[in-house]
Amino acid sequence: MQEMEELNTKDYRRVLNLLFGFMKDAAGEHQMNNLLVLMANLGRDMVLADRCSLWLFDEDSQELWTKVAHGVNELRIPMDKGFVGYTLNSGKPLLIENAYQDNRFDPSSDEKTGYHTASVLTVPMFDSKGKVMGVFQAINKQGDSPVFSQSDLDCLNLTAVYSANTIESAKLTHELEETQREIIHILGDVSEYRSQETGDHIQRVAEISGKIAMYLGLPPEEVNQIRLAAPMHDLGKVCIPDAVLNKPGRLTDEEFIIMRSHAELGESMLRSSNRKLLRFAAVVAGSHHERYDGKGYPRGLKGDEIPLAGRICAVADVMDALASPRCYKEPWSEEKVKAEFIKQRNCQFEGRIVDVLIEHWDDIYKCYREMMENQDDSWIAREASIRA
Ligand code: C2E
Ligand code: SIN
Ligand code: SIN
Ligand code: FE
Ligand code: FE
């Protein structure tokens, strides 16, 4: 903050208030486009400009792009045009009193919009490796003076530092979330691949679980958590020998004991994770074969003792198991599946969940049918041919 010495106490307060306000707003915002608008607004308020935009460098297209608050589309400009291009390439700020007297000015956007650019301030935004990742551009100083000052430049520099940090951590968070999602699906696919279930069984169970959770009226974050955790419900099947897992026809009592261990196995594989979502998936894996009447496994939990996500996943899992072909059974008709759920109301399944399922049957079954029609088991077929 050494550079800020020129600011008087009143300005200093104003700048701090703007920064704190920005940090509060940015913390709750995960959409990159909305973050860019917050940052551009911060820049505008910091230097009292009529307009401010944050241009980000897109390495793939070698262009600069920006998002404007009320604009529909993003704007793009070549990386070597105008004041913004100059700052991007040189890494140096510009303090311009009259744009039209400077030969670096690119008047084409004024010509398009009918706006008149007079004073301009541009500052580079550096990433943590010291590379220019974007440019802040403030246009037309408001207030007593018609031109930007050295302390405006310092303020916009400060805005750029905070913005670069925010953008980099937003990108990192996005990357981590995507990675987690991908690993979850790979784990689910692994159990599915081993057990030769109909392609996309885990994905269908996940979507159906999500639908049921939604129709039960759970908050969106919980619906999403269930949808993300459900693909791992049968993870424990990776530990079940092929001879049992893929046996055509009925299992012997002994084989069934081995088979049933998949619930506890899946739970114990996931339970020690540091990730909340994976620990939640452990609960689902460990409880998806409990029965509402207490006759399920592994613990014989009854009623509300069974975690809600497990009660939901049980319904979705059996819906898919009955409607789809299995190595031990033919697929059932839609009517037969529906009748089985009604029959198992408050026996195998919680009555309230069955009621919601029946009330929204058409939509939920449509979800099953559409996923069945569009299933992508090409990679399973490909892997199978490699193994053969
Ligand atoms: P899965 O094929 O995904 O079946 C999931 C669950 O669907 C079963 O869990 C069971 O709760 C339900 N389900 C299957 N058939 C019926 C039915 O006719 N009526 C009702 N109400 N529910 C049904 P379960 O029984 O604990 O089986 C777990 C896994 O064990 C099955 O997963 C499957 O991989 C295997 N499995 C079960 N029975 C047999 C069998 O007879 N032969 C073979 N080879 N595997 C079996
Ligand atoms: C949850 O309710 O989110 C699961 C508990 C946990 O994983 O901490
Ligand atoms: C739990 O609540 O910790 C899980 C219960 C279960 O896996 O059955
Ligand atoms: Fe299972
Ligand atoms: Fe299953």
Image (tube, rainbow, N blue to C red):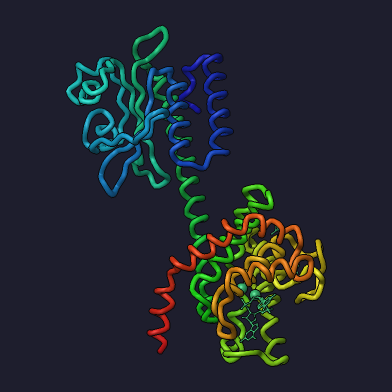
Residue at 21% over, 32% down: 81
Horizontal and vertical percent position of residue 260: 70, 81
Query: In the rendered image, is residue 271 in sight?
Result: no
Horizontal and vertical percent position of residue 112: 23, 23
Vertical side of 351 occupied by 253: above or below: below
Q: Residue furthest top?
A: 144
Q: Residue furthest left?
A: 103
Q: Quadrant of ligand 2?
A: bottom right
Q: Residue furthest front?
A: 335
Q: Quarter of the image holding residue 99?
A: top left
* Front-lying residue, 219 or 79: 219
* Front-lying residue, 3 or 217: 217
Horizontal and vertical percent position of residue 316: 63, 66
Q: Quadrant of the C terminus?
A: bottom left
Judge left or right: residue 197 versus residue 378: right
Residue at 49% over, 60% down: 179
